[in-house]
């Protein structure tokens, strides 16, 4: 059976922007900041992020930044777990003390 085709998360032109930025990074001419006024790009991840942000500015199809969404979800899960654990411990202690 043939696999179902998935929707593209990034447009092809957004990929071209990232590719262009990676070439600059490999040459050593990539700079961070608006208009390339910042310091030299030192990591691949940084180069990819710059390429994606340029694509966003041009209005190309690029999903929202995942890090903000993930950290918000994780934070709410952690606090929910902590509160449920605390309440269950307190109730068990109370029961043993009453006996």
Image (spheres, helix red, strand yellow):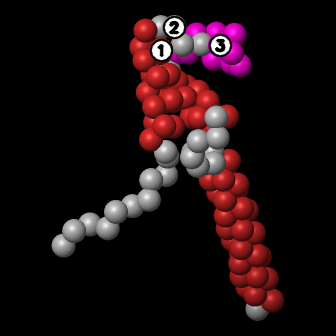
Frontmost residue, 37 versus 85: 37
Residue 30, above or below 17: above
Circle number at residue 36? 3
Left or right: where 43 falls relative to 80: left
Residue 86, above or below 93: above
Rendering coords of residue 61 (x, y %): 57, 46
* Dot 3 and dot 1 residues touching (CB under 8 Å): no
Magenta part of the chain? 32-42
Residue 40, above or below 94: above
Q: CA distance from mark 3 to mark 1?
A: 11 Å
> Residue 56 magenta-drawn?
no
What secondary structure is found at the residue carrying circle 1?
Answer: helix
Left or right: where 49 falls relative to 20: right
Residue 15, above or below 5: above
What secondary structure is found at the residue carrying circle 2?
Answer: loop
Frontmost residue, 89 versus 42: 42
* Dot 1 and dot 2 residues touching (CB under 8 Å): yes
Say which quadrant the N terminus sits in: bottom left
The residue singled out by tag 2 in the image is 29
């Amino acid at each position: 059976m043939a696999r179902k085709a998935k929707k593209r998360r990034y447009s092809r032109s957004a990929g071209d922007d990232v590719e262009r930025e990676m070439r600059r990074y490999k040459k050593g001419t990539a700079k961070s900041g608006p208009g390339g006024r910042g310091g030299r790009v030192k990591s691949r991840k940084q180069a990819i992020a710059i390429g994606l942000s340029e694509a966003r500015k041009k209005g190309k199809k690029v999903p929202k930044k995942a890090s903000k969404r993930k950290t918000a979800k994780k934070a709410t899960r952690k606090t929910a777990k902590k509160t449920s654990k605390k309440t269950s411990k307190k109730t068990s202690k109370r029961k043993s003390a009453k006996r």
